[in-house]
Amino acid sequence: MAENQLGITRPRDLWSRIIDSDLFYSFTRNPVVVVSAIATLLFFIGAGFAPWLAPHNPFDPASLDLMEASTPPVWIEDGMSKFLLGTDDQGRDILSTIMFGSRVSLIVGFSAVIFSVIVGVTAGLFAGYMGGWTDTIIMRLADVQLAIPAILIALMINGIVAILLPRNMQVEMAIYVLILAIGVSEWPKYARVTRGSVMVERGKEYVAAARVIGVHPVLIMVRHVLPNVMGPILVFATLGLALAVITEATLSFLGVGVPPTTPSLGTLIRIGNNYLFSGEWWITLFPCIALVILVLAVNLLGDWLRDALNPKLR
């Protein structure tokens, strides 16, 4: 039996149900998705445990040696075995900086997606369920924002907050400002997806039954409607993570993201870009490759999840 007397599913039975599910079968039969999942998992492990797994601490000044600056990758002449991907102009190990940089990029991406989901899903729930002027006001606001490129909105928010903050707080609050800028620029997409799903669900019998027995509209939205529209939202959030990472890299590359003292993939690419045509190509190439692999892997997982959860494609 899958549940004990208290109605709690046992871990062994839960694992058996996962293995026997159509989702797991679809996952194991798609080698591209499996490779993407492994790549994403490696990025998460490398980023999450960077202080322990990274060969060096690239942001410990005591461990840096300027005599080892601009060392090429290990397979090139003058390369050193302890620096597999070479070093930058300050002697920092490129592999270690990528691991620490991925950590910041993923934190910013996840936080921005969570912020966008909270704001967008809340707005979409009220717009789709309430209808009328509530729907009109929220959707027109979303339409206006969607007419402006997200990167411009993020730049504008970043600039406004930077002006309002005291100069001594700008560096400390840089990551939080970046999360806010990306999150605010992406919420209309989640609002539209949620609204469309809610408009389908609100006409079903279980919603009508809840209304008849006098359940408060907010409770209907949260307890009954929201769980049934989470599928498309989760798929969109997976794809949104890749977009948020790209936006963070773009803003950091433009110099309005995290400060140079805080590593991120975008910051590493911006720093390495200054040395691209001086023969030190590895400083910017390897962070670029890491960013492409991370975004591509997350996108492929999102595409698979969208198809796997679509009953019309089963």
Image (cartoon, rainbow, N blue to C red):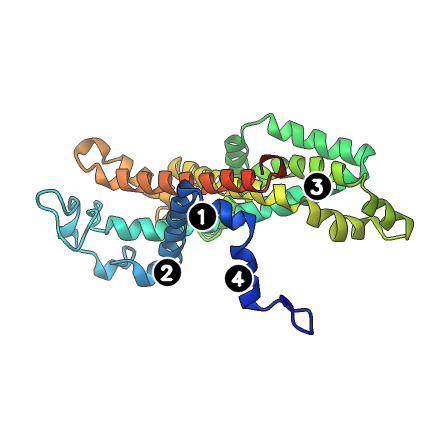
Residue at 32% in and 63% down:
52
In the rendered image, which residue does mark 1 sit on?
A: 28
Q: Earlier in the sequence, mark 2 or mark 1?
A: 1
In the rendered image, which residue does mark 2 sit on?
A: 49
Q: Earlier in the sequence, mark 3 or mark 4?
A: 4
Residue 205 percent location from the top left of the image: 83, 44
Residue at 51% in and 56% down:
19
In the rendered image, which residue does mark 3 sit on?
A: 123
Q: Nearer the viewer, mark 3 or mark 4?
A: 4
The quadrant in which the N terminus is found is bottom right
Which residue extends farthest top?
147
Count the labels in the image.
4
Residue at 81% in and 38% down:
203
**Amino acid carrying mark 2 in the image:** Phe
Q: Earlier in the sequence, mark 1 or mark 3?
A: 1
- Residue 183 lies in quadrant: top right
In the figure, is residue 170 to the left or right of 180?
left
In the rendered image, which residue does mark 4 sit on?
A: 15
